[in-house]
Amino acid sequence: MADLIERRWNEFTLGVWPDDRITLNFKFYEQTRSEAADRRGIENSFTSINEVHAAVHLCRKVLHQVREASGGFLPTAFTGVDRWKG
């Protein structure tokens, strides 16, 4: 696990490991993990560097603050399930 808290959001690559920390209370895997996707057998990973950058930026600017204020917010994954029609 790497501590990537200080890495700028637009310097992330597709090679980020799931357990790499992107904020004080978020690991990278939390941006793609989804029980709904698992149940449906949907691949739920980032397919472009733009998706990685957007997810890290959103996590740092919004989700981190929501988790801190709520004491335990679990986000729905941003990819895969969001595109699933069915």
Image (cartoon, helix red, strand yellow):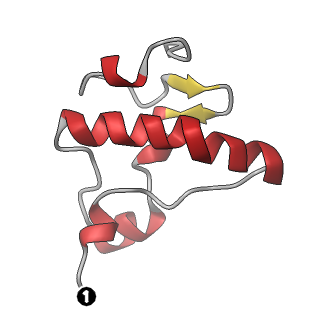
Q: Nearer the viewer, residue 60 or 13?
A: 60
| Residue 53: image location, x then y, percent | 33, 33
* Relative to 59, 65 lies left or right: right
* Relative to 85, 5 lies left or right: right
Q: Which residue is mark 1?
A: 86
| Furthest residue toward bottom | 86
Tag 1: residue type? Gly
Residue at 48% from the left image edge and 22% from the top image edge:
20
| Residue 73: image location, x then y, percent | 70, 55
Position above or below: 18 against 55: above
Residue at 56% from the left image edge and 17% from the top image edge:
5
Residue at 26% from the left image edge and 22% from the top image edge:
13
Residue at 40% from the left image edge and 42% from the top image edge:
55
Q: Nearer the viewer, residue 59 or 20?
A: 59
| Residue 16: image location, x then y, percent | 34, 23
Question: In the structure shown, which secondary structural element does the residue marked by tag 1 occupy?
Answer: loop
Specify the quadrant of the image occupied by residue 37.
Answer: bottom left
Position above or below: 44 against 13: below
* Relative to 40, 24 lies left or right: right
